[in-house]
Amino acid sequence: MSTDAQQDSEDFHAWQRWHEGRIVAVAAPHGPLSLTGTHWLADHPEGRIPAVPGLWRDEGDEVVLTATSEDGLTVDGKPLAGEVRLGADRGPVDASRVARGERRLVVLSREGLWAVRDFDPRSPARQGFRTIDATPYAPKWSLDGTFRSYASDRTVRVENADGRERGLGLSGEISFTVDGGEHTLQVAVEPDGSLWAVFADATSGNGSYRFRFLRPPAPDGDGRVRVDFNRTLLPPCAFADHFICPFPPPGNTLTVAVPAGERNRIDG
């Protein structure tokens, strides 16, 4: 297929819409570029987080936030003057319970530890962002794959982007062929049945970000799944240093180059 024919194909146009949608989502007011800090409450036992108003206390299974009217915080859209008990925010960032003007203060829990994330639309990263560098759609990187689930879920300890080690859940693996060679990636299974892989390849750190994400759709009843590297994603930590993205687990560094999908963030 010629390059012109590829760019006239429905697959190319679908990829183009996906790519443009990703740029819009990343650059949104409360997208990943707006994250200015992830503050672990264990690092602030007195409850005061620099540049974040209020008093934040870890009380085991929830966080207690105390604020005065001068702090300018709102909870569920109403001014907070007093105390409120909070659990982890599960929905979109812009729907977080706590806000201060345009900022969103998102409560996060990981392995029993609580943190507060500060999303500010005026962040320098968001102001300096131009686009996502991505390789245009190429049919050769949309591959037939096979999913095999493990007898039971596994958890491996992997380093995260913030330098701490955390558990990464894995439910199975996908296998696929590139240039006649078979390769596998370990994957997690999301609640909707879709898959998630954290992987590196021969381009990682040399033409693309140091690792990337892949999110294949749910396999069919026979385990067949489309492994489309054209839709390889940059992890959130490629857009802001304050994310805690997991690094690839052992075995998820491909020996082949995958010059497809998103490669790097471009600032203007």
Image (cartoon, rainbow, N blue to C red):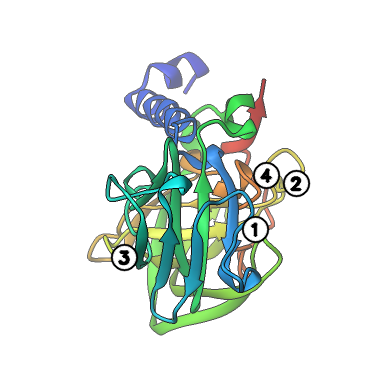
Image vertical order of residue 222 relative to residue 61, above or below: above
Residue visible at 51% across and 59% down in the picture: 116
Residue 33 x/y as whole percent: 55, 38
Tell me which corner region of the image, top left, top right, bottom left or bottom right, holds residue 122: top right
Mark 2 crowdedness (10 Å alpha carbons): few <14, some 14-19, many ≥20: few
Amino acid type at mark 1: Leu
Mark 1 crowdedness (10 Å alpha carbons): few <14, some 14-19, many ≥20: some
Residue visible at 77% across and 42% down in the picture: 206
Question: Which label lies toward us, 1 or 4?
Answer: 4
Question: Exactly how many numbered labels are in the figure?
Answer: 4
Q: Which residue is mark 2?
A: 205
Kindly indicate whether the residue at mark 2 contacts the one at mark 4 (C-beta within 8 angstroms): yes
Image vertical order of residue 247 relative to residue 113, above or below: above
Question: Which label lies toward us, 3 or 4?
Answer: 4
Disc number placed over residue 209 in the picture, else none: 4
Look at the numbered disc 1 and give the secondary structure of its residue. loop
Q: Earlier in the sequence, mark 1 or mark 4?
A: 4
Q: Residue 243, can we see it?
A: no
Q: What's the CA distance linking mark 4 and mark 2?
A: 5 Å
Residue 102 x/y as whole percent: 43, 35
Look at the numbered disc 3 and give the secondary structure of its residue. loop
Q: Which residue is mark 3?
A: 223
* 222 on left or right of 28: left
